[in-house]
């Protein structure tokens, strides 16, 4: 059974950086489409970034040039490097696995989430 | 970006009721649509994908229908564990976008 465990969240000040980790088990991240989805307190869901099985990456406009998604195949882990954090980046960040290569846009497994709080 | 509009934003219902949630896309999606259930403090759970395909392990009382711009999630007979927030999500083009959510509450 696929499992995802996020870590790395915390409270930071505006302009600071954080790196989130998503350790996977039960499948290999290098063969999967992996995404980060965030949810601001009391709000809906927003896709942040995707890394394709081939290594290509995509970013939402709100985080482009500030966030970087990557993976370490040897650790079966996906990362989200978040720089120049803003108050509006405050959210629970979920790691999610795409259903398949063709149906990568459906998220069939999710982590438990990690809270990022940006405040002065 | 494709805008996803869900209605209603909340619904009060009783155990055994039939509940219908609608989702409208700002442009045609073919059948590239999913539905998720989220309970407080938990991650979303995939219920339906490709508009009408039931995810493995999801009870058959959940039904998805529709195509292009208009989609529906129906819960045919509510159980206590179905009280939650439901989101639609388009998988047609990046950035993938979600609806604003529909909270199903106990009447």
Image: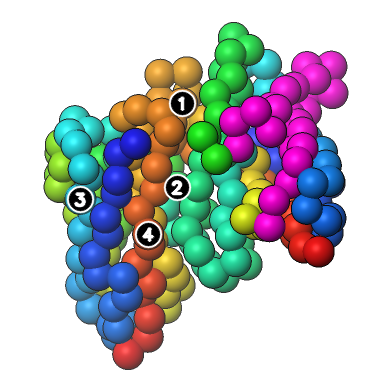
**Residue labelled with disc 2:** B46
Q: Residue at x 32, y 90 (%)?
A: B107
Specify which label sits upstream in the sequence, 2 or 3: 3
Quadrant placement of the N terminus of chain A: top right
Q: CA distance from mark 2 to mark 3?
A: 19 Å
**Subunit ID for the residue under disc 4:** B
Q: CA distance from mark 2 to mark 1?
A: 13 Å
Q: Residue at x 69, y 33 (%)?
A: A66
Q: Is residue A108 magenta?
A: no
- CB under 8 Å between discs 1 and 4: no
Q: Is residue A101 above or below residue B73?
A: above
Left of A86 or right of it: where is B20? left
Q: Residue at x 44, y 70 (%)?
A: B84
* Span of residues in magenta: A63-87
User: Residue B24 got which mark?
Assistant: 3
Mark 2 vs mark 4: tell me if same chain. yes
Nearest to the observer: residue B81 or residue A110: A110
Secondary structure type for disc 3: strand
- Residue B75, position in %: x, y? 26, 64
Nearest to the observer: residue A66 or residue A99: A66
Q: Is residue B14 above or below residue B69?
A: below
Mark count = 4
Q: CA distance from mark 2 to mark 4?
A: 16 Å
**Residue labelled with disc 4:** B100
The crowding category of the residue bearing disc 4, from other C-alpha atoms within 10 Å (few below 14, some 14 to 19, many at least 20), is many
Secondary structure type for disc 4: loop
- Residue B106, position in %: x, y? 37, 85
User: Residue B74 got which mark?
Assistant: none
- CB under 8 Å between discs 1 and 3: no
**Residue labelled with disc 1:** A104
Mark 3 vs mark 4: tell me if same chain. yes
Specify which label sits upstream in the sequence, 2 or 4: 2
């Amino acid at each position: 059974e696929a499992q995802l465990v996020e870590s790395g969240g915390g409270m930071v000040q505006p302009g600071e950086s954080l790196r989130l980790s998503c350790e996977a088990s039960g499948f290999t991240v290098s063969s999967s489409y992996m995404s980060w989805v965030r949810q601001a307190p009391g709000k809906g869901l927003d896709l942040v970034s995707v890394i394709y099985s081939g290594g290509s990456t995509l970013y939402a406009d709100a985080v482009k040039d500030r966030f970087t998604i990557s993976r370490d195949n040897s650790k079966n882990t996906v990362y989200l490097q978040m720089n120049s954090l803003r108050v509006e980046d405050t959210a629970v960040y979920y790691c999610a696995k795409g259903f398949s290569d063709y149906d990568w846009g459906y998220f069939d497994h999710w982590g438990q989430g990690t809270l990022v709080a940006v405040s002065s | 970006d494709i805008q996803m509009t869900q209605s209603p934003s909340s619904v009060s219902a009783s155990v055994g009721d039939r509940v219908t949630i609608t989702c409208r896309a700002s442009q045609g999606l073919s059948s590239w649509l999913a539905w998720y259930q989220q309970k407080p403090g938990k991650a979303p759970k995939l219920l339906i994908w490709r508009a009408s395909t039931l995810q493995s392990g999801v009870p058959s009382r959940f039904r998805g229908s529709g195509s292009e711009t208009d989609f529906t999630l129906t819960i045919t007979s509510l159980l206590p564990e179905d009280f939650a927030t439901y989101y639609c999500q388009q998988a047609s083009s990046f950035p993938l976008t979600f609806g604003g959510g529909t909270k199903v509450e106990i009447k």
